[in-house]
Image (tube, coloured by chain):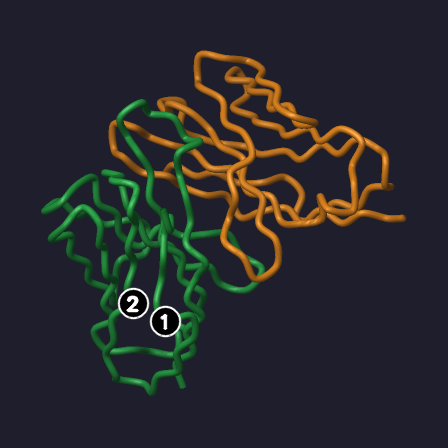
Amino acid sequence: NAGVTQTPKFQVLKTGQSMTLQCAQDMNHEYMSWYRQDPGMGLRLIHYSVGAGITDQGEVPNGYNVSRSTTEDFPLRLLSAAPSQTSVYFCASQSMRGSTADTQYFGPGTRLTVL
Amino acid sequence: GESVGLHLPTLSVQEGDNSIINCAYSNSASDYFIWYKQESGKGPQFIIDIRSNMDKRQGQRVTVLLNKTVKHLSLQIAATQPGDSAVYFCAEIYSSASKIIFGSGTRLSIRP
């Protein structure tokens, strides 16, 4: 049971490049989400999904796309990277069956720098 | 709009003392609240949660209090230890919207 995994751990992009941040969980969690965390700041919700085939926008969705073709995977795609997207990105998953928050897990994060 | 925020961005406490970290929220329809601990370079780690129909919940060395009248949440850490140094976030869950919204965080530092 690996929990929530994210790849890559570090990434440097040039402005205008696109890339996909990968997130996978092996706990059969329905709920998955992506957050960004800027220095000295809290986590801001980008997109989330309550199940395969279902996605929705969070607080800061602009510039990002997501898809949820399987329960396990929830990739985050940067369409055209901008310096303002320099941040640490966290993926999280949670079981919604019992609505208990202690089943939420975070991945280790992806540190993205856009030049 | 709905928001979750913190009163104090930083908190310094003496080792062995109790720590109290506060959080204000604005959405009275939230189902429950969570406290997370985030150590440097790591993702947030669940500490304790509380449902909206509760006033208090205790864990190991931690207690969460919920005051729905003033929309206030607090995390109490007993006998603070050096390992408690971290940033603490409160989060608010709207089950109806399936959203988990985080506050901006409080950094807890421990004085020897």
Pointers 1 and 2 within a single chain: yes
Instruction: Give me the chain that's orange.
Output: B
Question: Count the marks: how many?
Answer: 2
Asked if labels 2 and 1 touch by Cβ distance under 8 angstroms, the answer is yes
| Chain of the residue under label 2 | A
* Callout 1: chain: A
Q: In the displayed orientation, state which residue is furthest to the right.
A: B112
Residue A48 lies, in percent from the top left, at 26, 47
Which residue lies at the image location 34% right of the left edge and 67% below the top edge? A7
Q: CA distance from mark 1 to mark 2?
A: 7 Å
| Residue B70: image location, x then y, percent | 55, 20
Q: Which residue is mark 2?
A: A21
Residue of label 1: A8
Identify residue type, mark 2.
Leu
> In the figure, what tint was chain A given?
green
Q: Amino acid at mark 1?
A: Pro
Neighbourhood count class around disc 1 (C-alpha, 10 Å): few under 14, some 14–19, many 20 upward: some
A20 sits to left or right of B75: left
- Residue B59 lies, in percent from the top left, at 61, 23
Question: Looking at this view, is A44 or A30 the one in front?
Answer: A30
